[in-house]
Structures are given as structure tokens and as C-alpha cells.
Image (tube, rainbow, N blue to C red):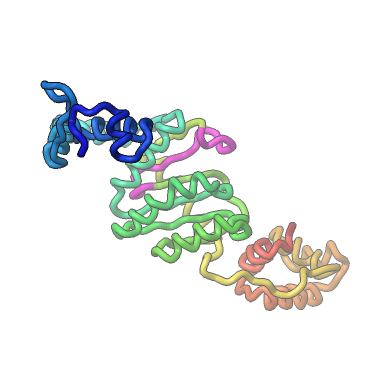
Amino acid sequence: MIHPTDSVERMAARSGLSADEVADAEARLFALGLLRPSPGGGRVAISPESAADALLAPLEQDILQRRIAMATTRARLHSLSGDYLEARSMRSAKTIIEVVEGIDNIRAVIDDLARTCVKSIDALTASRPTEEAIRASTPLDLEQLERGVRTRRVFQHAARKHWTSMQFLETLAAAGAEVRTASALPSHLLIYDRSCAVLPLDPQQTAAGVALVRDPAVLNFLQQLFEHYWDRALDFAESEQRSGAEPTGVDRDVLLMMAAGKKDEAIAHQLGMSPRSVSRIVARLMDRLGAESRFQAGARAALNGWLS
């Protein structure tokens, strides 16, 4: 039988443990509050329930104080909602073009625009999206689509050649976004509810800063620019037109000039052929590409890599 006033060595001898093992066990019991020093010397055992109350009470008090502080802060922030909405309406004045610099500020503004838009988002993505951009964009994109916001996005054809980008485009399309690709785009562009556009200050360094455009005349131009590229882009749902081997020889020459916008007569004159022969080659190429127009044939040829 071990007495509360026994020394470590005596308890070790009686329990068959080493003195170090007894000292370690004693220290752990004291740390948990299951042993306390006795006023009369030695130790006194404490029930687990009492030890838990004594050990956790300060933590529970700290949690309570933190909850009170959180609730107070939340109430203060909510009380500023009216001021925020008033300031936001002032910021949305029709003549304002606002410049935002710094990647964190840019992300905060885009996050705000994305979460408050209610009707539509139109976007041109002029370079292959990075994995970091995809991770940041995906939750917002899916949340918007779930809210019923119509989303139209145009990417470059290069996105179809990159696995991570393809997964991103497939995720957007599966969630209800309208996705298309084009051979080249002039710049990144985001238009929210047709009332605010986001343009990079430097198209080559989009993280440097953006301009928020709300001027009606400029917005109208940017919307027309988006529609121009949207109408000419290929639907992402269309399967890639892998129509056999890449054209060579005269067929390739005709395709390149056709894609450059030249008419059959001009192509025939440049190649020293008859217009009828050129027309037959053009018809054959369009049939291979499954295209209904010369423009669509050029776009699909670019998608196949035939124009590189």
C-alpha cells in the first residue's frame, strides 16, 4: 500500500517501477490536476471531474471572453453596412474610373464585385490561367453560377492544350458557365452586371494594378469589344477538329491566305492558279474542318495548330 507521504524512492520500491518512471508519472498527474500538494505534506488525489473543472475553467472563461469580443466586433461591423452601401453607391458614380493597385487590393475588389453581382459576368482571359489564379477563381465562379448569375468566358485556344486549364474550363462548363476559346485576345477584361468593368493597367503585368470603369460610354465600348470576340470564338463544348494530317503544299498555302482573309481571286492570282481550283481547295478544307464559314474554318485550323 502506497501512502500519500511516501517518497518517490519508496513508491518505486513498492510498485516495482524505477524512480524515474514514478517521478514522470507523478509530474503528469500534477500537470493534469489529478494530484495536488497536501497542506499536511505529501499529495492528495483529486477526482477527474474536479480536475477537469479546475483545469478547463480558465480556458472556458477565455473562450467566453473571445466570443463576447467576436460578437461585439461583428455588431460594430454590421452597424457600418449602411455607410458602406452609401460609399459604394458614391464610388459607383457613372463618371468614375477608379485605379486600384496592389495584388491584395485587386483581389479584394474583384471578390466584392463577384459576390455582389446579380445578373451577368462577361470575361476575356488573354493568357493561360495559372494554377494560383484557378484556385482563387474557382470558388467565386461556382458560387456565382449557383446564384444564377449568367457567366460567359472566353479563353485562348492554348487553354485547351494545358491539362489544369482544361480541368478548369470543364468545371465551369459543367456548372453552367458558357465557355468559348479564341486564337488571340487583346487583354484581360471582366464586366460585372454590365455596370462595372475591370481592366489591367498593364496587360503584360496584370497584378500591377487595374482600372474600375463605370463610365457609360467606355462601358458600352468594352461590352461591344467582348461581344466581338464572343461571337467569333469557338464553343468549348465542340470537340476539337482533328481532321487528319496537317495540310501541306498548295493546300497549306491556300489555308494560310484564306485564314488571312484573302478572297479566292486574290489567292488564285498570288499562286498562279485558276479561281475555280482555289475554290475547290477551299471547299475541301472547309469540309475537312467541318466549318460552315471561312472564318470558322480559320478558327478551327488555328485550334488544330495548322496555322502555326
Image point 18% across, 25% down: which residue? 42
**Residue 155 visible (yes or no):** yes
Image point 48% across, 31% down: which residue? 209
- Residue 172: % across, % down: 44, 60
Residue 145 shown left or right of residue 286 in the figure = left
Q: Residue furthest right?
A: 272
Residue 270 shown left or right of residue 91 in the figure = right
Residue 262, quarter of picture: bottom right
- Residue 187: % across, % down: 54, 44
Which image quarter is the C terminus in? bottom right
Residue 105 shown left or right of residue 308 in the figure = left
Magenta span contains residue 200: yes
Residue 32, quarter of picture: top left
- Residue 11: % across, % down: 28, 33
Q: Nearer the viewer, residue 66 or 49?
A: 49
Magenta span contains residue 46: no
- Residue 176: % across, % down: 39, 64
Which image quarter is the N terminus in? top left
Q: Which residues are magenta?
A: 192-207
Q: Nearer the viewer, residue 19 or 51?
A: 19
Residue 308's place in the image compared with 278, above or below, is: above
Image point 75% across, 66% down: which residue? 255
Residue 256's place in the image compared with 93, above or below, is: below
Q: Nearer the viewer, residue 135 or 67?
A: 67
**Residue 79 visible (yes or no):** no
Residue 40's place in the image compared with 183, above or below, is: above
